[in-house]
Image (cartoon, rainbow, N blue to C red):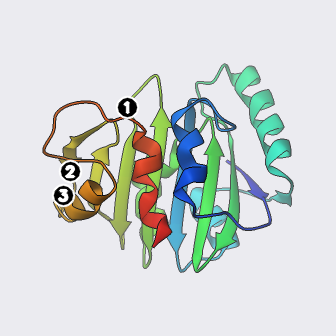
Amino acid sequence: MAAVDLGGVMTDLLTELAWLDTHGPLQDIFCVSFVHGLDPPEVLRRFGAVGGEEMTFGELNSLVAEYVAQTQGGNGGGYVGVVSSGGWSVAVEPWGWQGNLPEVIARLSKESEVVAVNRHDYAESHFVHAVDGTVVAGFTPQLPSQQYGSESQRLTALMREAGLDPGRDERVSNPFAAALRWRRR
């Protein structure tokens, strides 16, 4: 995994997250991980990144496109960009899914808290909330009834408030924007 410091701050406005459910700048495969209380260099270390450089989001996307073309996409995007936002570090993986892997979630959440959302149009997508190495609650954004974790029902009220009713077995419209709605708080 290569490291990238994207610089700047991300916005929390739900209306600006609607592109997550279309083929926007992150395309149809990505992972966004929010890590509480860790600075970007520590988040990069826990991802397993070696080295890093500051670049724009467009430059990151170009590097990822080259990597995906070389590897035919089987290894994900190969890069993670991290910015700091209000006590959280936000890791963005275009064409990636490392932030939702159990071993990475365990490392990222050790002595901290992680919320990660992975969109993968060709496999299963996930929302994961982990604290101190344990997945507390997780679900599939498109089918929020598929919950798991040590306290799988912990987020039920917030899920309903965001439009992700775990009591319904039907597909949700705009599942990724709704899954990230908690960041508005």
CA separation, marks 1 and 3?
18 Å
Structural crowding at the residue carrying mark 3, measured as other residues with C-alpha within 10 Å and reported as few (<14), some (14–19) or many (≥20): some
Tell me the SS state at disc 3.
loop
Q: Determine contact: label 1, label 3, CB under 8 Å.
A: no
Front residue of 77 and 107: 77
Q: Earlier in the sequence, mark 1 or mark 3?
A: 1
Q: Quadrant of residue 27?
A: top right
Asked if the residue at tag 3 contacts the one at tag 2, i.e. Cβ–Cβ closer than 8 Å, the answer is yes
Q: Amino acid at mark 2?
A: Tyr
Image location of residue 55, percent across then percent down = 86, 54
Q: Amino acid at mark 3?
A: Ser
- Which residue in the structure is indicated by mark 1? 124
**Separation of marks 2 and 3 at Cα, in angstroms:** 5 Å
Q: Are marks 1 and 2 in contact (CB under 8 Å)?
A: no
Residue tagged by mark 2? 148
Number of residues whose C-alpha sits closer than 10 Å to that of mark 2, classed few (under 14), some (14–19) or many (20 or more): some
Q: Is residue 78 above or below residue 103?
A: above
Residue 93 can be seen in this image: yes
**Disc 2 element:** strand
Residue that appears at 61% across and 69% down? 89
* Location of mark 3 (residue): 152
Q: In the rendered view, tell whether residue 80 sits above or below residue 153.
A: above
Q: Is residue 63 left or right of residue 18?
A: right
The amino acid pointed to by label 1 is Glu
Q: Pointer 1: residues within 10 angstroms few (<14), some, or many (20+)?
A: few
What quarter of the picture does the C terminus occupy? bottom left
Residue 81 coordinates in the image, percent (x, y): 71, 55
The residue that appears at 28% across and 56% down in the rendered structure is: 159
Marks 1 and 2, Cα distance to the nearest angstrom? 14 Å
